[in-house]
Each structure stands twice: as C-alpha cells, then as structure tokens.
Amino acid sequence: MSDEINYQNNPLHGLGLKNLLIEMVDEYGFEVLFAYLNINCFKTNPSIESSLKFLKKTDWAREKVEGFYLYELKSLPRASSEQFLLPPRDRVIPEGQVPGNPKKLDLEDAERLREKRAKKSAVRKQTEGRNQATGHRSGKSVDPWGNRK
C-alpha cells in the first residue's frame, strides 16, 4: 500500500494561475468576481495581468480565488473540515468526485450573499464585544493587557 497522496484528481493540479484567471473571467467577468470575492484587483482597473500580479504576491487572495474556482466554477462539493484547513491546491478531491458545469452566478445573488455575510459579521462583533467585556474571548482567558492565556 502506498502512503503517497494523489493530487491528480484536483482540478488545480497542473493549472497555472493565469489560465485559471482567464477561465474564470471568461465565464463570469470581473464584475461578478468582485461581487462574490470582494478582492479589489477585480474592481479597480481590472485586467488579467494586474490581477495575476496581485494574486501571486497575496496568498490569502490567491487561496480565495482557487477555492472559488473549485467550488463555484467546477461545482465540486465543499471540502471536508479537515481538507478545508489546507490551501486549495493541496486538497485531495475524492476519486468519485469530478468537476461539473459552472454554477450560474449573477450580481443579484452576490448582493444577497453580501447582506447575509454582513449580518453574520454584525452578530459576531456583538458576541465578541460581550466576550471582551467579561475578559474572555473564544473560551480563553485574557490578561489585563489583552493577551490570551
């Protein structure tokens, strides 16, 4: 039995970032990408080259774009909680899962999603504020200088 992990089933395997961007822009356009991902390189003077330059330098943004590619453009089922902790390029896609057709996305759905995220964020901030008032945060105690113990 081999302990080697086969990443060949991951649609990102062997796909360059430039080709990934071209495929996403061809399918959705910069406006929809910005609406769903909220990454400024898709809004301010968007181009493949400028987006590529930014994404190569910014790990969190590149991982967000790669995740979007896997789960929206390729319509793969969401990753398990264990796999979700890994960057998208390192995730193992189970053998039986194959990429599907791109999801239909539009600006109206993006606006609803943005509102939903804003509500969740507001609830999180309220909860965080209550925890900080009691000196606790996420179940961990905090010393008087705000450091977690």
Image (spheres, rainbow, N blue to C red):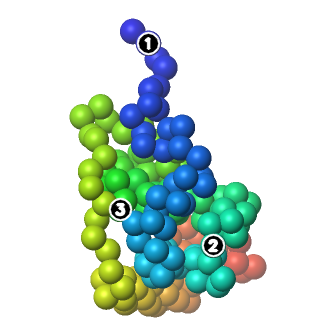
Quarter of the image for the C terminus: give it: bottom right
Tell me the kind of residue under disc 2.
Ser
Q: Which residue is mark 1?
A: 2
Mark identifier at residue 72: 3
Tell me the kind of residue under disc 3.
Glu
Q: Which residue is mark 2?
A: 47
Packing grade of label 2 (10 A; few <14, some 14-19, many >=20) is some
Residue at the location (62% across, 78% down)? 46
Residue at the location (28% across, 65% down)? 103
Q: In terms of secondary structure, where does tag 2 sit?
A: loop
Q: Residue furthest front?
A: 26
Let me know if residue 90 appears in the view.
no
Pick whichever, 135 or 91, lies toward us: 91
Q: CA distance from mark 2 to mark 1?
A: 43 Å
Residue at the location (66% across, 83% down)? 45
User: Where is residue 87 shown, x and y percent of the image?
Assistant: 54, 49
Packing grade of label 1 (10 A; few <14, some 14-19, many >=20) is few
